[in-house]
Image: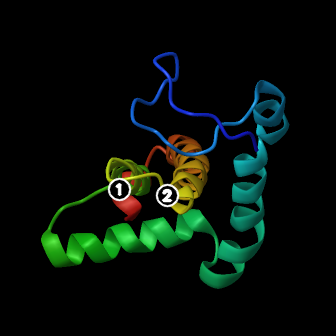
């Protein structure tokens, strides 16, 4: 990593940390996605089961507690918002990993909800 001082041309005013050269940055592209994929396909499925079933069950529990009916996809979108909100208070790699993972799960939920026209009645 190359140490550089802050200058008017840098995109983050006041940032005093190390900057990557263009070559270093290019080498890192996709690293976060690869790490998120590993978490999604190994760790989380083993711990919590299929993500769609997990979010469907979570939506049912929320409905019992609050009388608010949400589709699993809507619940996932709320969690993405939570992680984005946390990023406003400072960079957290973990939150970015979660956003990538939740975005993938959001796509899965939308596809499964669209495949079952009677889905809302089965919650």
Q: Mark 1 and mark 2: span between their CA atoms?
A: 8 Å
Percent x, y of residue 81: 34, 49
Which quadrant would the N terminus be assigned to in this image?
A: top right
The relative height of residue 17 versus residue 51 in the rendered view (above or below) is above
Percent x, y of residue 60: 33, 72
With 18 as the anchor, is 9 left or right in this view?
left
The relative height of residue 108 versus residue 52 in the rendered view (above or below) is above
Residue under label 1, please give it. 86
Q: How many other residues sit within 10 Å of disc 1, few (<14), some (14-19) or many (≥20)?
A: some
Query: Which label sits on residue 92?
Result: 2
Q: Residue at x 31, y 77 (%)?
A: 61
Q: Residue at x 74, y 39 (%)?
A: 2
Query: Which label sits on residue 115?
Result: none
| Figure coloring | rainbow
- As drawn, the residue found furthest toward the left would be 67
Q: Quadrant of residue 83?
A: bottom left
Residue toward you, 36 or 86: 86
- As drawn, the residue found furthest toward the bottom would be 47
The answer to whether mark 1 and mark 2 are in CB contact below 8 A is yes
């Amino acid at each position: 990593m190359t140490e550089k001082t802050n200058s008017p041309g840098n995109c983050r005013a006041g940032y005093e940390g190390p900057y990557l050269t263009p070559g270093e940055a290019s080498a890192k592209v996709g690293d976060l996605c690869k790490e998120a994929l590993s978490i999604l396909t190994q760790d989380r499925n083993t711990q919590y089961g299929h993500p769609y079933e997990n979010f469907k069950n979570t939506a049912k529990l929320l409905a019992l507690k609050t009388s608010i009916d949400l589709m699993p996809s809507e619940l996932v979108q709320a969690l993405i918002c939570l992680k984005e909100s946390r990023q406003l208070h400072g960079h957290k790699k973990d939150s970015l990993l979660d956003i990538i993972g939740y975005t993938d799960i959001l796509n899965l939920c939308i596809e499964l909800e669209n495949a079952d026209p009677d889905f809302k009645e089965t919650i």
